[in-house]
Image (cartoon, helix red, strand yellow):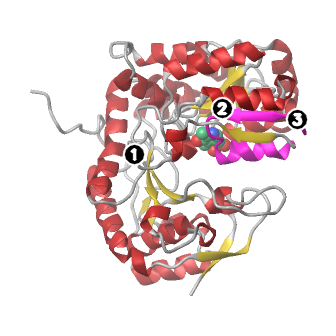
Amino acid sequence: MEPRTIIEPFRIHAVEPIRMSTRDERLAAIRSAGWNLFGLHADDVLIDLLTDSGTGAMSRDQWAAIQHGDESYAGSPSWYVFLEAVQELFPFRHVIPTHQGRAAERILFSALGGPGHVVPNNTHFDTTRANVEATGALAVDCVIAEGRIPALRHPFKGDMDLDLLDRTIREAGPGNVPVVFVTVTNNSGGGQPVAMANLRGVRRVCDRHGIPLFLDACRFAENAWFIHEREEGYASTPIAEIVREMASLADGMTMSAKKDGLANIGGWLAMNDDGLAARCRNLLILTEGFPTYGGLAGRDLEAIAQGLREVVHEDYLRYRIRSTAYLGDALDDAGIPVVLPIGGHAVYIDARALLPHIPPTAYPGQALAVALYLEGGIRGCEIGTVMFGAHPDGTETAAPMDLVRLAIPRRTYTQSHIDYVIEVVRHVAELAPDLRGYRIVDAPTQLRHFTARFAPLD
Ligand SMILES: *Cc1c(COP(=O)(O)O)cnc(C)c1O
């Protein structure tokens, strides 16, 4: 028989308690957090779907690997275990460990950015955009038009618009474009994959202009799974081989091991260019540490190495992608507007469509995210005008979409947790006409969504 139910391919070995709470308790908690879900005590959250970053469960073998951690300052055996595991999938000449993805971004863009420079990407993730802009460079999103329409189905909605990319490079002048980035999967655009054919196309555009191509590869395994499932010619290709083919089209990568590294912390920067690697290593030593640990403990390097071996396993990826779709399909079936098709690591609710009476500058995503917390203790994340609406010059405009992301931590929640989430979202959707917007009372100039304080509008 071909079973319909895709079971979790693991048993639970250690449990963490969830503290139950009442709506009144949650109201008090979110009010004192300035109506910002990032300000909550995590104990006050029932189901934490804020992010899939570093929040997954590690395996028995990862915990065992931690015991192998060697904390030598230079040349630790754990570094070589890490290096080998990374290069097994991404055979770049230079691998530079960092404490997480944004450290890799900061180092790379410090070396390549600067005023007058333009960095194209299918869609910049928030920290990527912030690190590009912090150097004075311009971050330009070139995702295909389909990728900006939440309800439109397309198998590779994260694809780069190759004509738009070419035009962006010509208008900037190729000499002002130090690197082209492709984010796999496209996190800010709905966790949508990029096709191998599209990566080849981006490579051709980069070659035409003599520009290096880097992957923001945080969810490389999920992207490879979608290629395996959806792109012709890959149905019988092992996942690791698909990953190596993706890598072969690029000149380097940034990585957060908190995603498809299946670890709680870590990341790296990798590249083939010797000169660039030397500059990046010097920056690494300045803020992260010696090049054989880069801000990580030896035990972290071991956990990541083991995670990289597990994440390309087909049983894991089938379960991972199916369990995300289980939540998304149920919401779609209930008539709740979600980004379609369902992405790899998260379900994105289209708050602008669900709350048409709240204009983008009154933050419909924030209104929905707060309501999900109040009604059911679920913590999601606004990905919209709060996150992307403020510009370096102090102005504010509507983001292209106002979404609430329900990110699924890896191997952490069971199907009954997700059934509860479905029930809560359906309840909140019924309350939608009564939800009100928010205004920002206080916010920093960069990455304001993390620390902004809000007030509800009457
Ligand atoms: C998480 C993420 C980053 C940044 O990584 P951190 O480990 O959170 O610093 C960069 N790009 C994408 C696409 C991400 O999802």
Q: Amino acid at mark 3?
A: Leu
As measured in the structure, the alpha-carbon distance from the residue carrying label 1 to the one carrying label 3 is 43 Å
Q: Nearer the viewer, residue 159 or 421?
A: 159
* 61 in the magenta segment: no
In the rendered structure, which disc, 1 or 3, sits on the residue that comes first in sequence?
3
User: In the displayed structure, does residue 10 sit left or right of residue 353?
Assistant: left
* Amino acid on which disc 2 is placed: Leu
| Residue for badge 1 | 340
Front: mark 1 or 2:
2
| Dot 2: element | helix
Snapshot quadrant of residue 59: top left
Q: Residue at x 55, y 36 (%)?
A: 144
Q: Nearer the viewer, residue 118 or 244?
A: 118
Tell me the crowding category of disc 3: few under 14, some 14 to 19, or many 20 or more residues within 10 angstroms, Cα based. few
Q: Give the magenta part as a residue range.
A: 114-135
Quarter of the image that includes the C terminus: bottom right
Decide if ligand 1 comes within 8 Å of the CB at mark 1: no
C-alpha separation, residue under disc 1 versus residue under disc 2: 23 Å
Q: Secondary structure at mark 1?
A: loop
Task: Say which residue label 3 marks.
Answer: 286
The image shows residue 338, relative to residue 28, as above or below, that is above
**Image quadrant in which you'd find residue 395:** bottom right
The residues bearing labels 2 and 3 have C-alpha atoms spaced at a distance of 37 Å
Report helix, strand or loop for mark 3: helix
**Which label belongs to residue 164?**
2
Q: Earlier in the sequence, mark 2 or mark 3?
A: 2
The residue lying at 69 percent from left, 68 percent from top is 452
Vertical order, 212 against 163 (above or below) = above
What is the three-letter code of the residue carrying label 1?
A: Leu
